[in-house]
Image (tube, rainbow, N blue to C red):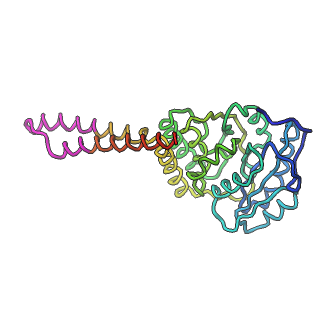
Amino acid sequence: MAPASHAPTNEVPESDPRPVDLTVLLPAFDEEEAILPVIEEVRAALARWQGTFEILVVDDKSRDRTAERAVSSGVRVVRRPLNGGSGASRKTGTRAARGPWIAMLDADGSYTAADLLPMLAHFPEFDQVNGARTSEEGTMKALRVPAKWMIRKLACYLTRTDIPDLNTGLKLYKRDLMLRYLWVIPDGFSCVTSMTLAFLANGHAVKYVPTVYKKRIGKSKFHPIKDTRRYLATVVRMVMYFKPLRVFGPLALLILLLAVGKTVTDIAWQGGGIQESTIIMYMTGILVGMVGMLADLIVAQKSLS
């Protein structure tokens, strides 16, 4: 059932006891230059939406005046006592949100808030709607683009889903569903990837809408080596949490195929005898497959409980 209609630009302040249909979550760390323009852009974007909304800024222990400027704009601000990372802020905001639907975008001005309206048009038919960026405007593009492409292709293979943008920070999702998966969301930059994969791996309907990505306001906090490593580990870990056979199955098959190839080599070159190392490869492949099936049974049992 869609939210009830209200007057346009119906932003509900924190002091107003009325329920809201949508929480717009802005996780922020040292974004004093961008926070006010982003808040105003969100307000302008939702002026034509027929629902009530709140804007929630989660300040991740900023070292500048991000929180003070957000407070001055009249939005609700949650201040984290310790800096925990982008994912920590998103988890805090998801728990603190008043609305059953949550729209999330970065507070650095890189995403186009006007794209929230076409995204909202797909609710509640879909459980999560993501803004698929049409260009890469971040720093260190020579490192970002190939790394993201490779990891995205791996995620597509493991989830058996076409994913046009795996780590977009422009998201719209149902709060009750996301609360189920906060336990797997890391505190760092790979959190948005985990949010996408958690829904895909558990069969929730996910939609992508093209969005214009802009150059961010202020300095980027992206660390190319550390964050790319975490990004890759997140993809594999998330799929193993929910679809372990898609990791263990191909790995077991690969080992067994190598064992078969080595068997042929042993017979052709060693005069008919199979070496002990070949037998170990067979046993390893079988054990990896068994571990995958056991893990898959455990996941299936948990999903039923």
Disc tally is: 0
Residue ranking furthest to the front: 305
What secondary structure is the magenta-colored segment mainly? helix
Q: Where residue 164 appears, x then y in whole percent? A: 60, 36
| Quarter residue 69 falls in | bottom right
Magenta stretch encompasses residue 268: yes
- Residue drawn at (79%, 63%), measured in percent from left and top? 67
Frontmost residue, 115 versus 304: 304
- Relative vertical location of residue 246 with respect to residue 79 in this rendering, above or below: above
Residue ranking furthest to the right: 7
Magenta stretch encompasses residue 291: no
- Residue drawn at (60%, 42%), measured in percent from left and top? 196
- Relative vertical location of residue 176 with respect to residue 160 in this rendering, above or below: below
- Relative vertical location of residue 237 with respect to residue 250 in this rendering, above or below: below
Range shown magenta: 256-283
Q: Is residue 204 left or right of residue 255?
A: right
Q: Where residue 21 appears, x then y in whole percent? A: 80, 42
Frontmost residue, 39 versus 159: 159
Q: Where residue 78 appears, x then y in whole percent? A: 76, 60
- Residue drawn at (87%, 44%), measured in percent from left and top? 44
Image quadrant containing the N terminus: top right
